[in-house]
């Protein structure tokens, strides 16, 4: 197995950043109370972190998914993309903040079908959207809708895929250490 490339760009911190990188890191610090390790690499090109933060916030606030459903979407994408950092972070959020049932969280982390039929339909459709590069079949959409979702939810999943592509791929390249608060959820 080949080891993936690690980019040779220093992650930004509040102490080392200037201009746009410093401004976006300060905004993250104010919003979260800390700066997750993954943000340092993304801030090497401030537009990447800024776009991520805006898309993440909009996904959370504007797509009509419950907090538990949001984590199912984020975890399904991160599992498919093989992002250990995001799997740890969103597992902690799912467990401590978003109300994802423990059996569903375990299934998400292990790549198994979820015991909750509606959440499983969401996970399966999200994975299908990533796998097919946004080309679900009519049968995929029909199954998703039969589970209780609407077509308007599909663009929300596309937004989550965009957001997680930014973070998952950045994490693959920068390989940030999983923050202490997420460390108990490493996969």
Image: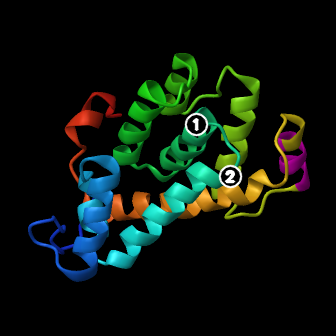
Residue interval drawn in magenta: 138-144
Q: Is residue 31 left or right of residue 53?
A: left
Q: Residues within 10 Å of mark 1 (few under 14, many from 20)?
A: some
What residue sits 69% from the left and 31% below the top? Answer: 119
Q: Residues within 10 Å of mark 2 (few under 14, many from 20)?
A: some
Label 2 sits on a secondary structure element that is: loop
Dominant secondary structure of the residues highlighted in magenta in the image: helix
Most extreme residue toward the bottom is 19
What residue sits 58% from the left and 36% below the top? Answer: 67
Q: Between 20 and 122, which is closer to the camera in this rendering?
A: 20
Q: Is residue 140 magenta?
A: yes
Label 1 sits on a secondary structure element that is: helix
Q: Is residue 74 left or right of residue 53?
A: right
Q: Is residue 64 magenta?
A: no
Cα separation, mark 2 vs mark 1, equals 11 Å
Quadrant assignment for the N terminus:
bottom left
Q: Position of residue 103 (x, y in %)?
A: 55, 17
Residue highlighted by disc 2: 63
Q: Position of residue 163 (x, y in %)?
A: 51, 61
As drawn, 112 above or below 127: above
Q: Which mark is residue 67?
A: 1
């Amino acid at each position: 197995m080949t080891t993936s490339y690690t980019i040779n760009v220093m992650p930004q911190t509040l102490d080392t950043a200037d201009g746009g990188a410093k401004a976006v890191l300060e905004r993250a610090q104010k919003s979260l109370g800390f700066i997750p390790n993954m943000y340092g690499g993304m801030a090497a090109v401030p537009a990447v972190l800024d776009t991520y933060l805006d898309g993440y916030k909009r996904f959370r606030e504007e797509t009509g998914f419950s907090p538990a459903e949001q984590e199912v979407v984020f975890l399904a994408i991160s599992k498919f993309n093989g992002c250990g950092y995001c799997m740890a972070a969103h597992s902690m959020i799912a467990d401590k903040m978003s109300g994802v049932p423990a059996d569903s969280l375990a299934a998400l982390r292990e790549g198994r079908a979820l015991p909750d039929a509606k959440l499983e339909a969401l996970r399966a459709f999200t994975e299908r959207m990533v796998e097919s590069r946004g080309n679900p079949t009519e049968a995929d959409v029909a199954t998703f809708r039969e589970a209780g979702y609407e077509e308007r939810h599909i663009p929300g999943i596309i937004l989550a895929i965009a957001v997680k592509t930014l973070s998952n791929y950045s994490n693959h390249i920068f390989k940030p250490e999983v923050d202490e608060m997420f460390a108990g959820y490493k996969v």
